[in-house]
Amino acid sequence: MSVSPATAGTSAPGGPAGAASGTTGSDARADRTSLRSLLPLLPYALRYRGRIVAALIALVMASGATLIIPMAVRRIIDYGFQADQAALIDQYFGVMIAVVGVLACASAARYYLVMTLGERVMADVRSAVFDHLTRLDPGFYDTVKSGEIVSRLTADTTQIKSAFGASASVALRNLVLFIGAIVMMVITSPKLSGLVLLAIPVIVLPLVASGRSVRQRSRLAQDRLADASAYATEAVGATRVMQAFTAERSTVARFARAAEDAFETARAATLARSMLTAVAIFLIFASVVAVLWYGAQDVMADRITAGRLSQFVLYAVFGAGALGELSQVWSEVSSAAGAAGRIAEILSIEPKIRAPRDPKPLPTPALGTVDFQSVTFAYPTRAEDPVLHRLSFSVASGERVAIVGPSGAGKSTIVQLILRFYDPQSGQVVVDGLPVTDVDPQALRERIAFVPQDPVVFGATVEENIRYGRPHASDAEVQKAAELAAADGFIRALPQGYGSRIGERGVTLSGGQRQRLAIARAILRDAPILLLDEATSALDAESETLVQEALDRLMEGRTTIVIAHRLATVLKADRILVMDGGRIVEEGTHATLVNAGGLYARLARLQFEAGAAALGMERAAE
């Protein structure tokens, strides 16, 4: 399902948690909490017009059956309580039983159709929001918390579901019943109806006036809940660190404060809604009592029959009850509008990294060339502090290039720009002869296999994690990739082998095992460009040797860029680029750079001397 942003615009720093819409202050809050926030959701409901029509038919039948009952009551009161009218009473009660049967069946059908419509619409909305989230660039996720996003996918959509489900069902039923009751009241007694209609503005205006306050409070309550959810997600994901530092009490206390803040905000919103409901119910039924008293005077003066007054009172009660229910639903819909505004904010954020209007096709077969042409780049969150300064270099097809340097030199940023997770402020990145901004990002990334420094492993099976690199690969290809990554041995030792589930983020595996799975995923990808960002940093000496041999075979015939701190992993590179402060300060092979006596030589001396010392200590211990 494709998703178009609800409105044009780009996100401001802070993502959806902040005011990203371009408006500020109370105007922005009013805009976000307006009932218009629900309008972007209507197209999702209109996909199911057949179900909507069926629900409306059931609604009309149920309301019609309800409105027939007072007419039967009037007949019974006026004509039925006489000895010679016993047969008529039997007929009226028989008809009423039939009417009640129709009412019950129609009400059940209406409830089922409207509730399932709400569930269906929310499932589509959740899918649309998640689809949109997967298309947003990494810069968006630099400024938001994943827990807040999860809260919007769950808590917010659940609240909106009530607007399209239970609230919609109640609202439609009571709206039709209210209109029908008003019409029948006018038919029954125009005089008394006039008195009731005069009271309606007195009832409705306070509801409308207070609705904006209720929506704002509900929106704030959802924001506080999202904050608590974000912190909980972060804390649960770092359980081991929390327990290792015995920070359980402080973590629990902080979440308790966030939860209490969310409760107090929700309590204030609920109080506003309850006060609104109390005022509405009092005004509605007080007006009914006043009209009933006035009608009783007409009965005593023989200007109206007792049956007709009873019919009118029943219609007035139906109308008052319906209006009371509508006032409560109005509060619920106002709350849902606040949640819908939060969802609309996400859908309105346009990715900064996207395909051009007319993307150019990459050459086939792939060349595997990479060129940086005077690239200057700073991360959006640190725009005043460039990471790369007019960086230029080229990587030929099939060449192995290693990029080394101290921490913060900008090595990993090069990988991010090749994958087009970000765009440089000046200069351009060229892959296979085309600037990456001229091609579809997906087409670009399909030509790249990437092994990150911090391997990402999903809470699925081993086989599913490896196949993530190529979903339609065969079982034999998956196992071959694992063998090449020196992972087959430990995988087969797991309880269910390749079918073993490895926990969220692969917590049941060691760092080296997770990294070998990430390497197997890249091997299975079989792409012409291979990016290795510290791909062997978490491996022990034996595993590193095995994986390095596998990578050597994998790199044959492929363009490879290796980011490394450990210089032992780059000795076989065709060329080594040495970076410092976002610039290339040296270039050459291992031997020429060592002889040059520059930064690389100093790094090599420190690392190899440290390695020799560690080896000596191991031998002494033996």
Image (cartoon, grey):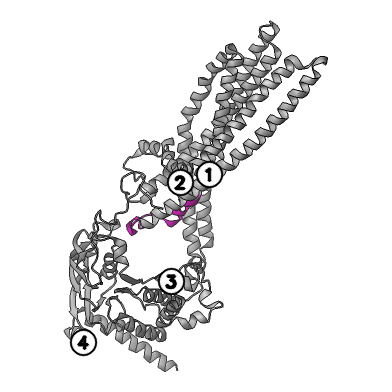
Q: Which residue is mark 2?
A: 223
Q: Quadrant of the C terminus?
A: bottom left
Magenta stretch holds residue 138: yes
Which kind of residue does numbered mark 3 sit on? Arg
Dot 2 or dot 4, earlier in sequence: 2
Label pair 1/2, CB-CB below 8 angstroms: no
Q: In the rendering, which numbered label is found on residue 467? A: 3
The amino acid type found where label 4 is placed reads: Ala
What range of the chain is rendered magenta? 136-154
Q: Is residue 235 above or below residue 7?
A: below
From the viewer's perspective, tell me whether residue 254 is left or right of residue 305: left
In the image, what residue type sits under mark 2?
Asp
Q: Position of residue 28 (x, y in %)?
A: 36, 39
- Determine the CA span between mark 1 and mark 3: 36 Å
Q: Element type at marker 3? A: helix
User: What is the three-letter code of the residue carrying label 1?
Assistant: Leu
Labels 4 & 1 near each other (Cβ < 8 A): no
Q: CA distance from mark 2 to mark 4?
A: 58 Å
The residue to which callout 1 is attached is: 117
Sequence-wise first label, 4 or 3: 3
For label 3, count other residues whose C-alpha is less than 10 Å away and answer few (under 14), some (14-19) or many (20+).
Answer: many
Disc nearer the start of the sequence (1/3) = 1
